[in-house]
Image (cartoon, rainbow, N blue to C red):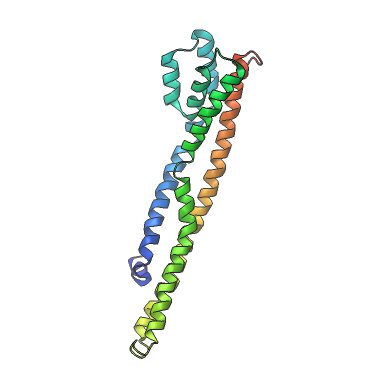
Amino acid sequence: MFTLIQAAGWPVWPIILASIVAVGIIGERLWALRPGIVTPRDLLPRVMQEYQENGVSAEMLMRLHKHSPLGQILAAGLKNDKSTREIMKESIEEAGRAVAHDLERYLTTLGTIASLSPLMGLFGTLIGMIEIFGSNSPTGGGGNPAQLAHGVSVALYNAAFGILVAIPSMVFYRHFRAKVDSLVVEMELQALKLVEIIHGERKS
């Protein structure tokens, strides 16, 4: 592997740095966007049971807020349980926007890496082409085979590394965006159930 990096030359180092950042983001988002962490299925029934037994308390709201992203949205709704249905929905929507923004953390960076990696590879290709032309110039030693081979290596390896980083980064970026959208929809449905139950429009 180190031999390949040497053959690719110095332009490959930004691509390697981008790949390390991308791997870190992918691992962190895979862990953070698990449905059991974001939208626990048993949370709403437990919240409604506690609400019916004890009502809303500051301790309950604080516990919910720390529990999960869904808990933050439900806590925002329960703060306004005595208000009208419209006010309760507005507070839930505001909390939902904040939670959705938090779920999209680092995705912009991952998308940027996916877009820029081929360009960084192209930059390395141009550097390699400059070396190739330099080896054939009158001042380049009359066609230095070693310099020519190095220029070809820099051009090809950087293009390959750039594409190699861009493809998985783009795949995971689109996967995470779709997953965030799905989780947000699920949280909206759970919050709507909470509003309807509290305001007597459904039993459970």
Q: Position of residue 133 (x, y in %)?
A: 41, 82
Taking the image as drawn, is residue 191 in sight?
A: yes
Left or right: residue 115 compared with residue 182: left
Outermost residue toward the right in this view: 201
Residue drawn at point x = 37 percent, y = 85 percent: 145
Residue 58 screen position, x and y as percent: 42, 14
**The N terminus lies in which quarter of the figure?**
bottom left
Quarter occupied by the C terminus = top right
Q: Is residue 196 above or below residue 108?
A: above
In-front residue for pair 83/13: 83
Question: Residue 122: x and y, percent?
Answer: 46, 68
Identify the residue at horizontal 53%, vertical 20% (top origin).
77
Q: As displayed, is residue 40 above or below residue 111? A: above
Residue 123 or 46: which is nearer the viewer? 123
Query: Residue shown at 42%/25% (left/top)?
Result: 66
* 23 to the left or right of 171: left
Which quarter of the figure has residue 9? bottom left
Mark yes or no: residue 152 visible.
Answer: no
Q: In the figure, 64 relative to 50: above or below?
A: below
In this rendering, position of residue 183 left or right of residue 109: right
**In the picture shown, does residue 176 fall above or below 36?**
below
Question: Which one is nearer the viewer's eye here, 172 or 14?
Answer: 14
Q: Looking at the image, which residue is at 52% across and 44% down?
A: 176
Q: How many marks?
A: 0
Residue 98 location (% of width, % of height): 49, 32
